[in-house]
Image: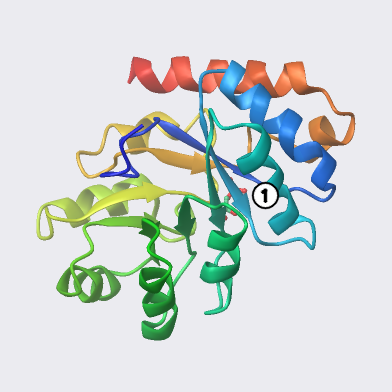
């Protein structure tokens, strides 16, 4: 899988919160089975770094990244645990420096045109748009395309199977991200077949757009 572009790997990047690191490997395997071999493991729980390490060690067929990168120590920690890419909901100059220093491909988060222009000046062309629905949704992203065509986005935040198509139809959207593939109740009852089914359904729907 080429990492030249994080936006062109899969149409839907699963954004995953893991409370028990033991769930990480079966979730990763279910996503691979469902045809989405990319996982953004959010650094929102104490189990997250261990979860990333377990996936990196035991499920080499998936590309594992660290999401919710919000402080400058996290990029190096994530890389040391096997993360292959980084995603941040927003960024500061020092956070972007830390992400660059990790050597990993990364998607800094933006939600305004001025942030988009700032990051383009720094050489970024691939960005996360967060929180997508609350920050203006698919119409907002489409409106940015005309004045700022060089920027491409992975919107996340409030994306569902129902609105996914509106985003994917915008010329500056490479893929979408979301947590709906691993709902807390499904993970809670360890229903890995359901995770695989949700991934398969999302992929098929996304490819139809
Ligand atoms: C993220 O970190 O990208 C978001 O929390 C995902 O948003 P969602 O839970 O609304 O899909």
118 or 142: nearer the viewer: 118
- Residue 187 coordinates in the image, percent (x, y): 81, 34
Residue 17 visible within the image: no
Residue at point 49% right, 42% down? 177
Where disc 1 sits, the SS reads helix
Residue 45 lies in quadrant: bottom right
Disc 1 target residue? 53
Give the color scheme: rainbow, by chain, secondary structure or one colour: rainbow
Residue 186 lies in quadrant: top right
Compared across the picture, whether 58 is left or right of 87 comes to right
Q: How many marks?
A: 1
Compared across the picture, whether 56 is left or right of 170 comes to right
- Residue 152 coordinates in the image, percent (x, y): 24, 50
3 or 40: nearer the viewer: 3
Which residue is the extreme one toward the bottom? Answer: 94
Residue at point 23% right, 76% down? 118
- Residue 7 coordinates in the image, percent (x, y): 33, 42
Compared across the picture, whether 43 is left or right of 111 comes to right
42 or 117: nearer the viewer: 42
Residue at point 20% right, 53% down? 143
Compared across the picture, whether 43 is left or right of 39 comes to right
Residue 95 lies in quadrant: bottom left
Q: Residues within 10 Å of mark 1 (few under 14, many from 20)?
A: many
State which quarter of the image contains the N terminus.
top left
Q: Is residue 192 above or below residue 54?
A: above
């Amino acid at each position: 899988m080429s990492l030249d572009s994080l936006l062109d790997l899969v149409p839907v990047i699963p954004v995953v919160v893991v409370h028990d690191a033991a769930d990480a490997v079966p979730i990763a395997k279910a996503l691979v089975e469902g045809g989405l071999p990319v996982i953004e493991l959010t650094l929102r729980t104490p189990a997250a770094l261990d979860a990333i390490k377990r996936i990196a060690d035991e499920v080499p067929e998936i590309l594992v990244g660290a999401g919710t990168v919000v402080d400058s120590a996290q990029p190096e920690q994530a890389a040391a645990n096997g993360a292959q890419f980084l995603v941040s909901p927003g960024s500061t100059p020092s956070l972007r420096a830390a992400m660059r220093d990790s050597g990993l491909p990364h998607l800094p988060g933006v939600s305004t045109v001025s942030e988009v222009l700032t990051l383009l000046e720094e050489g970024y062309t691939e960005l996360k748009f967060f929180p997508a629905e609350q920050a203006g949704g698919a119409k907002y992203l489409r409106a940015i395309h005309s004045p700022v065509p060089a920027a491409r986005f992975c919107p996340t935040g409030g994306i569902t199977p129902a609105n996914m198509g509106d985003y994917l139809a915008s010329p500056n959207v490479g893929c979408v991200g979301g947590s709906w593939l691993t709902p807390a109740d499904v993970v809670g009852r360890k229903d890995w077949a359901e995770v695989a089914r949700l991934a398969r359904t999302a992929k098929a729907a996304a490819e139809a757009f």
